[in-house]
Image (cartoon, rainbow, N blue to C red):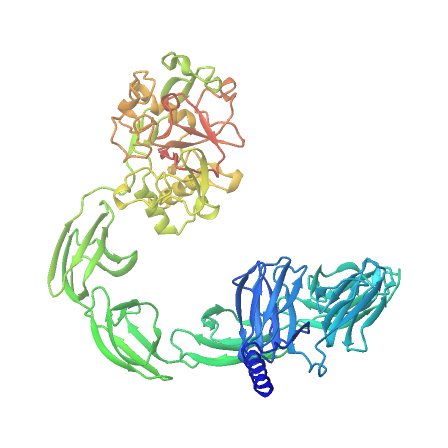
Amino acid sequence: MTGRFVKISLFITLFTTLLHPQLKELIVRPTENRGGIPILRNNPDQAGIIFYSQFDNLSFYSTYGITKITGDPEHGKYILVIEPTRQTIEVRAPGYKTEMIKIYSIEPREFLFYEVLPKKEEITGVAEVAITVQATPTDATILLDGAAFPNNTTTKVSVGTHNLTVEKGGYAPYSQEIEVTAENTFFQISLQKVQLTPVTIKSNPTNATVYINNEKKGTTEVGFFLFPGEYDIRLELPDYITFTEKINIRPSDDNSVNTFSYNLTKNKGNLELSVTPSNATIRLNGNNITRGNHELSPGKYQLEVVADLYFTHSEEIEIKRGETIKKEITLTKTTGILKLSLTPANASISINKERKYGNEFELIQGVYEVEISAETYYPETFTVEIERGKTVNKTIKLIQKTGTLQFTVKPPSAEVILKQNGVDKYRWQGLKLLNSIPVGEYDLETKTEGYKSYKGVITIKENQTTVTEIEMTPGSDAPEMVFVEGGTFTMGCTSEQGNDCDSDEKPAHQVILSDFYMGKYEVTVEMFSEFIEATGYKTEADKGGGSRIWTGSEWKETAGVNWRCDVNGKIRYESENNHPVIHVSWNDAVSFCNWLSDREGLQRAYSGSGDNITCNFSSNGYRLPTEAEWEYAARGGKQTKNYKYSGSDNTGAVAWYGDNSGGKTHAVGLKQPNEIGIYDMSGNVWEWCWDWYSDNYYTSTSWANPKGPSSGEYRVLRGGGWFSVARSCRVAFRGNLMPDDRDSNYGFRLAKTR
């Protein structure tokens, strides 16, 4: 019976042991970072704990919650992403008691490091013993394996190794492993009182983040206080290698004693690039970069260099920390050269239907269709094969299209000139049959003494005969001049001028003038262009920065504006050649007069230059009218009807001015003439006169053929223009400007003494 009871007891004991085996214990303790700190890119406001362990089946629980668990458990690494706040973490393993660690303070993006180990074998037969920890001072905090432990109170703990920590502000902390056995159960700890010591951390470069025992202290240069002892320091700075070491803080009140300086090593390498051709595009990992030096993080990169007409260069490069890679890349061309020598030289070139310019072309290897064409020539098309690295030379002479000109002129003594683009092409006298003359338009001019020159256009057509017969008109090319019979008139502010008179028009006074001639019209663009073409003369607008135009708010001198331009500074159409020439100075008008005198075989009126120009009024050459001559002719001479304007009291009947001009000049002679048949003496453009201007000249003027003051700064202008108000177009109104001045409102009219 007794034996059966023993057997049953043993069975019950064994069964109970199998159902409820005794749990083993874990050791969870702080440790060092063993490399590979993750960057919390997706959780920048979180913190982390890394556990290193031989266990691959750990599980964790937090009193505040765990955001996520990652890592590599198979190789003993667990990464917990947690909220940066006070909390308790439970560490669990099958067959082991749950261990807890208390987190009192942790910053965002900060990591703590722990290791998890099985506890050493317990003493045979003894699982727990009661121990006493007696700490001084009595209010010190006691932690046993990270958990709070009472002071001077007997408490049961497991037999084995434990981590005992005793700490209190103002004292050197105590932290040691203790061995608990049945014989070793009393532990007496006396903390040593210490003072905080100033610590300064510097780095080059600055702004590195400083961690002391994994606690963030700020960025360099940074100062703080620590108790004397050994600490782990870590410095982190983007693009630099993380620096770690142990530092020993010595007791001292001297700030310089515990100052630590570190030179951080840049986690970069360098790539130096030299690339030919200079216009090549450089890409690194698909991103465009430039030539020169580039600082890069260590790693492998794909380098590509591309350019039109070159083979692409591509390679993988590896950047290593602290090293410089130098790359000199010269791309290889994929092209050949086509050189063309053409007749005519200005022929148009199309390659594969695309218009090209120049005579040398760099082309990718292949076959091309080339077309050469020119106006009045038969085009030529050919193919050419371009090979890489080779030059193909081609000479092309286009065949010109031609026609025939059968020309007669009366009188047959006339000289005939054919021009294209202002260049003489053919010149002969009388009748002419021209075979094989290139097709196109030609400017025709015939001239001979006793006849008016003839100007026209001849068009030569392909394989056709153009018959042209010209009969010239007897006469002269000289400008039309109106004879003005001399006489006596009252000059200045006469009664018909009313209240519009200015002070410089007073007093009205008697003037006697001899006979003279006055231009029927203002000098036109066409007449002035003949002067430029014959002499190559450069006007003061050409030489002096242009001429003034009205912008809508101001008169502004504008470069490039000259006699060829309209009031807006734009080149005139040929249809406007009968408009008065503008943008000319007094000096330009004088030069024109002398040229025209020379062309007509007359004696020049002007000599000298600059401010020293003199006029010979007894010569028979062309000149500008005196101010008195201008006003006498404008009033109608001896046929005067005493109008306010030249030819009428109605401004619009005789003048283009501000109210009717539309902001531009008009062809000469469109308005009604004055009493003696002269046009546009009021309006269209102001007209230069010979005289120097003086505002009090009328008080002392000579009464017979006055010619103005002997000197001055300004020359007289008369008549008003397209921009003027009506009162400025009066026959008595006086204007003035410097002799080198010019704008879109000024022109001139010719005069002659005999």
x 30%, y 44%: residue? 526
x 44%, y 44%: residue? 546
Query: Would residue 435 be visible to someone looking at this image?
Result: no
Residue 328 screen position, x and y as percent? 53, 80
In this rendering, the count of numbered labels is 0
Residue 240 screen position, x and y as percent? 64, 70
Closer-to-camera residue (159/86): 159
In the picture, residue 705 is in which quadrant?
top left
Query: Would residue 189 be visible to someone looking at this image?
Result: yes
- Point out the residue furthest to the front here: 1
Q: Quadrant of the C terminus?
A: top left
**Image height of 458 relative to 3, above or below:** above
Closer-to-camera residue (107/401): 107
In the picture, residue 358 is in which quadrant?
bottom left
Residue 18 screen position, x and y as percent? 55, 80
In the picture, residue 120 is in which quadrant?
bottom right
Residue 215 screen position, x and y as percent? 70, 63
Closer-to-camera residue (544/97): 97
x 21%, y 75%: residue? 381
Residue 130 placement, left or right of 555: right
Q: Quadrant of the N terminus?
A: bottom right
